[in-house]
Amino acid sequence: MNHRSTLVAAGLFGASGVGLGAVAAHRLETFLAERGMTHAWETAARYHLFHALALLAVATWLQTATGARAGRARWAARCWSAGILLFSGSLYLFAVGGPHALVYVTPFGGIALIAGWLCLVGAALAKDP
């Protein structure tokens, strides 16, 4: 992922995060409450939007980063993108009645999100020539 594709991902994830939050607040509020899934949806949306913002920050950094720093920052962006899809995506689907097996996907998304943050640490600590 270069800075432009990371910026596109940040924009798409930001827009979809806001949209899904609005859908829950205006169309699914009662449905989610009856199923006891309001917290799951809110957690998905919170992580979705936080990581969209993180992608925006990395996209900005990637405009000037080089070498190992850039490579590790790109991996952070990849991990966060995968994490949003797996973690938040599985929670959204489970909250609206998706199969119970989705709960086994969610931790892999969480691991991807954590890995992204660790990649960011690696990017910050990289010593480029």
Image (tube, rainbow, N blue to C red):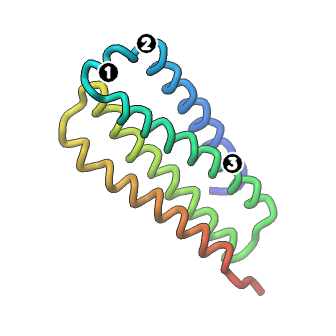
Rendering coords of residue 58 (x, y %)? 68, 56
Query: What's the amino acid at mark 3?
Result: Leu
> Which type of secondary structure does the marked residue at label 1 adopt?
helix
Rendering coords of residue 36 (x, y %)? 27, 27
* Disc 2 from disc 3: Cα separation: 29 Å
Mark carried by residue 27: 2
* Disc 1 from disc 2: Cα separation: 12 Å
Quarter of image, res 28: top left
Vertical order, 33 against 107 (above or below): above
Which residue shows up at 23% across the image and 49% down it? 104
Horizontal arrangement in the rendering, residue 57 relative to residue 110 (left or right): right
User: Which of label 1 and label 3 is nearer to you?
Assistant: 1
Mark carried by residue 47: none
Of the numbered discs 1 and 3, the one sitting upstream in the chain is 1
Which residue shows up at 48% across the image and 35% down it? 45
Query: What's the amino acid at mark 2?
Result: Arg
Vertical order, 2 against 124 (above or below): above
Which residue shows up at 24% across the image and 30% down it? 98
Rendering coords of residue 124 (x, y %)? 68, 73
Q: Which residue is mark 1?
A: 33
Q: Which residue is mark 3?
A: 56
Of the numbered discs 2 and 3, the one sitting upstream in the chain is 2
